[in-house]
Image: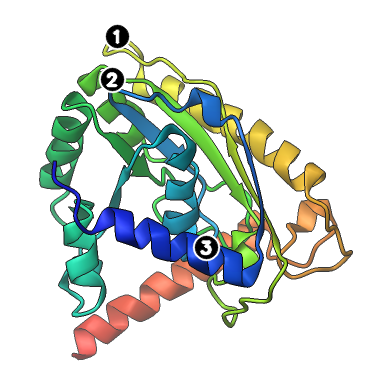
């Protein structure tokens, strides 16, 4: 796959990280294979998770092809970049095509990045996972690499204004590969992946250098004021209902 767009984008991202003086801590990067396919499963807490998630594979000199909303590929600004970096458009009304493309990429030896929660978590804890992650990995015969991001929600997330304050700590943690096979029950394999990532998230939150009580970006279970998972689920339902109403009115 010829990559004329991706390397300059990475260079731009590194420059932006330096300008912001982000304190990025990457752990577990040795788990990213230098060759061959793998599916990277990432928690979703921010609109910049694509950028930081891809940065986790840079030490291995690998490029990550992300599965992303199809609307980003139609946007006049993001579209050329998304297509040029060979990301995979996801149409939720017709997901079979994107699923097939991802499996083909994995079999061809690419790294594919997915967000098993599908949408950003307002509670910053893990939502329920879709089973497509483990099903794709099993069909392609590749491992799943769990990745946890922390701190990205402070930059740009749902219900909060952008805040690109300098010197902010960011944590990128990559766990050991998880093997899945076609014989594995998808629900059980998905539960195993989520359990692993839940433990990694707990470690990332507890190891984060800033823990201000009542912070909006800190989960309620850790003393923050973020919505509880139950409150976040209610907000998600309300958002979906509002979108449906706008579609009906248009």
Q: Residues within 10 Å of mark 3 (few under 14, many from 20)?
A: many
State whether residue 128 is above or below residue 44: above
Residue at image point 30% right, 83% down: 245
Q: Which residue in the structure is indicated by mark 2?
A: 138
Q: Are marks 3 and 1 in contact (CB under 8 Å)?
A: no
Q: Residues within 10 Å of mark 1 (few under 14, many from 20)?
A: few
- Local SS, label 3: loop
State whether residue 124 is above or below residue 103: below
Q: Which residue in the structure is indicated by mark 3?
A: 46
Residue 82: x and y in percent read 23, 61
Q: Are marks 2 and 1 in contact (CB under 8 Å)?
A: no
Query: 11 or 49, which is in the foreground?
Result: 11
Q: Residues within 10 Å of mark 2 (few under 14, many from 20)?
A: many
Q: Quadrant of the N terminus?
A: top left
Residue at image point 22% right, 22% down: 140
**View extreme (top): residue:** 183
Q: Earlier in the sequence, mark 3 or mark 1?
A: 3
Q: Earlier in the sequence, mark 2 or mark 1?
A: 2
Query: 249 or 72, which is in the foreground?
Result: 72
Q: Nearer the viewer, mark 2 or mark 3?
A: 3
Residue 118: x and y in percent read 39, 52
**Residue 71 visible, this orientation:** no
Q: Which residue in the structure is indicated by mark 1?
A: 183
Q: Earlier in the sequence, mark 2 or mark 3?
A: 3
Q: Quadrant of the C terminus?
A: bottom left
- Local SS, label 1: loop
Residues at marks 2 and 3, CA–CA distance in whole angstroms:
28 Å
Q: Nearer the viewer, mark 3 or mark 1?
A: 3
Residues at marks 3 and 1, CA–CA distance in whole angstroms:
34 Å
């Amino acid at each position: 796959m010829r990559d004329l767009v991706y390397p300059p984008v990475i260079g731009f991202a590194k420059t932006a990280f330096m300008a912001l003086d982000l304190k990025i801590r990457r752990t577990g990067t040795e788990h990213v294979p230098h060759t061959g396919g793998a599916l990277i499963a990432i928690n979703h807490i921010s609109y910049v998770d694509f950028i930081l998630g891809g940065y986790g594979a840079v030490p291995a000199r690998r490029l990550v092809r992300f599965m992303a909303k199809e609307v980003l590929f139609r946007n006049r600004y993001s579209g050329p970049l998304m297509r040029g970096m060979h990301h995979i458009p996801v149409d939720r009304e017709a997901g079979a095509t994107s699923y097939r493309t991802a499996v083909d990429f994995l079999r061809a030896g690419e790294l594919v990045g997915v967000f098993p929660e599908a949408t950003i978590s307002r509670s910053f804890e893990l939502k329920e996972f879709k089973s497509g992650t483990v099903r794709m990995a099993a069909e392609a015969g590749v491992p799943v690499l769990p990745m946890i991001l922390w701190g990205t929600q402070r930059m740009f997330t749902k219900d909060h204004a952008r805040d690109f304050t300098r010197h902010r700590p960011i944590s990128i943690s990559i766990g050991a590969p998880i093997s899945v096979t076609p014989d594995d029950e998808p629900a059980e394999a998905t539960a195993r992946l989520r359990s692993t990532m839940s433990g990694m998230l707990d470690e990332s939150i507890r190891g984060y250098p800033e823990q201000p009580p009542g912070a909006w970006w800190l989960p309620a279970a850790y003393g923050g004021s973020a919505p509880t998972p139950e409150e976040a689920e209610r907000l998600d339902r309300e958002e979906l209902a509002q979108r449906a109403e706008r579609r009906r009115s248009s």
